[in-house]
Amino acid sequence: MSTNRPSDLPEYVNPPITEVAMGIQFDPANGYQQIYARDLWKQFEARFPVVVEQPALPPTFETFGTPSGGNMKFNVVTGASHDRYWFISSDEQNLIQFQQDRFLHNWRKIDDNEHEYPRFDPMIANFSDEIDCLDEFLRQFDTEPISINQCELTYVNRINIDDVSPEQKIFNFFSLDTLNAENFSFRSNKEIHNSKGEPVARLITEISTALHKNKKVIHLSNIVRGTPDGTDKQSALDFLLEARRLIVNNFTDITTEYAHKIWGIVK
Amino acid sequence: MPLTQPPLDENGNIEPHDHDGIADGDTIIRKISHHFVVDDKNGGKRLSSMAFKASNNEMSVDIESLMLEDGINPQEFVTTPVWIGSISLMAGAFRSAGLMVGYEPVEGNPYHGEVWGKVTSSKSKTLAKAANWYVPISGVSVI
Amino acid sequence: MTTGADITAFSGDVIQLQTQTTPSVVVDSSVVWSQSVIDKLNLFCRLEEGWDGYNGKPVRLSTANFVIKMLERIYQPNFPEPQLVPGSNGDVQIEWHLEGLDLELHCLSPYNVIAWRETEATGEDGEEVPIRADFRTVMNWMNEYMEADIAPHAATA
């Protein structure tokens, strides 16, 4: 798979990214059972030799109507529950997450001084191949091709407050000094519409203070989650490409030019 | 008269078709599960439009004429302790709604047919109006 | 709502596996009928193949969970409890039959819903709208019904 980074998309030499996760949610294959997860791991074992079990992620759907989903909140889990498996690379930077209806690839910064962010384009090219692998694996249970109903792209940034002089702002819309808070958290949701004007996804921005190695930092995450135009792999990849554009632009829009220079903006 | 073999695709599966051996006046039966029974607005019971909807553009039915030719009692054939009721329509009612009525024998049911086509909610209502109880479920109206 | 933190590796410390039990339902709702909806969906997801007398399949888990999300989005206080009906291909329909309104939400799969209503204004053919994720049309229909339903009561108060 080849991708062309949009020429007008901002780019940074040293973005404060510490994790990127791209994922799909799909209809579970008829006849698949958790015991077969080992066979899927075999396809990835050479690159991801370590396996860890985690609780399953609940299904998620971005729908639009009553704000905040009203007063009704409930989940249904039926049938045998399926764990979530992490297939982890030897250097722990990359991991694949798999459960009966979810498949994700995470890159994470393990050591502060090494392991540069590999960039989105090689990541999505690998993810495309990994989805092919998953699809081939699932076809042994269900002759229908994988049916993807949701996609998700997350960028997590860790901003060292010490990198920014006290007089300067990181974010365009508020100042840490003005806030003068012990800690804070912020969350915004923005509807994303398709070419027909239908809401199909959300851009979720979360900002919060945290401690990293005893230093105060700011976590900034941008998540785009929603339904692609079609249920096939290419529709999912198209969604993720557009999600990247939305996230990078949002990151640039909400942070200051001063911060951009620190992160080495090239355009 | 036995129905001619339906058309097959390259994999040997029966293709959607409108069988010319099934006359418009032929009775087409559909078993009714108790899951299709819902409350109506007047405090009584009625069938949901799902009883007349073609999931994935396919709706299974049974062809009465084939049972009669084989000397089978159709009402006994379609009624079991599980499926206690059934409705019937003329094949022509399905066709008037733009649907195809075909012959699709399956293992265990040589009288099985299929109705192909998209059934909207308003179309399902049209079918419901054209339907009658074949083996009624007491206290439940068709529409 | 699940956040990105739930899928990031940093937030996922290794914890003990949950015991495998019979299906669990978490209800956090002031809606009195939410449990019966859950019970119905659980039942439909366990239907045996051929439940309809033909080739009927159980309702798909992903579809059931999407229905939950859909009901969260359209829920309005005082609106009557919905009825649920399984389809033969893993689909499910949510429906209401009320004086002045027949409302059906046929969920074929996640993000694939056909909404239909019949009122005096629409006539017998009704009004059908395909819906992916935006349920505001359905909410408007429900609001119209409730406002119309309330108005006559107010006149006689």
Image (cartoon, coloured by chain):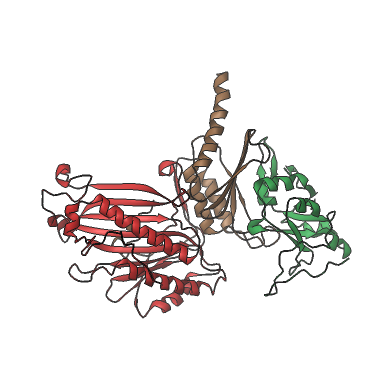
**Total number of numbered discs in the rendering:** 0
Q: Nearer the viewer, residue B113 or B36?
A: B113
Q: Colour of chain C?
A: brown
Image vertical order of residue B85 relative to residue A42, above or below: above
Taking the image as shown, residue A58 lies to the left or right of residue C125, namely left
Counting from the top left corner in percent of width and height, residue A102 is at 43, 64
Image vertical order of residue C126 relative to residue A31, above or below: above
Taking the image as shown, residue B111 lies to the left or right of residue B16, namely right
Answer whether residue C74 is visible to the viewer in this image.
yes
Q: Colour of chain B?
A: green
Counting from the top left corner in percent of width and height, residue C26 is at 45, 51
The image quadrant where one finds the C terminus of chain C is top right
Answer whether residue C88 is visible to the viewer in this image.
no
Q: Nearer the viewer, residue A164 or A139?
A: A164
Counting from the top left corner in percent of width and height, residue B9 is at 70, 72
Image point (16%, 53%), residue name: A258
Taking the image as shown, residue A28 lies to the left or right of residue A253, namely right
Q: Colour of chain A?
A: red
Counting from the top left corner in percent of width and height, residue C23 is at 49, 58
Q: Looking at the image, which residue sits at the far front?
A: A7
Q: Looking at the image, which residue sits at the far left?
A: A166
Residue A8 placement: quadrant: bottom left
Q: Nearer the viewer, residue B73 or C139?
A: C139
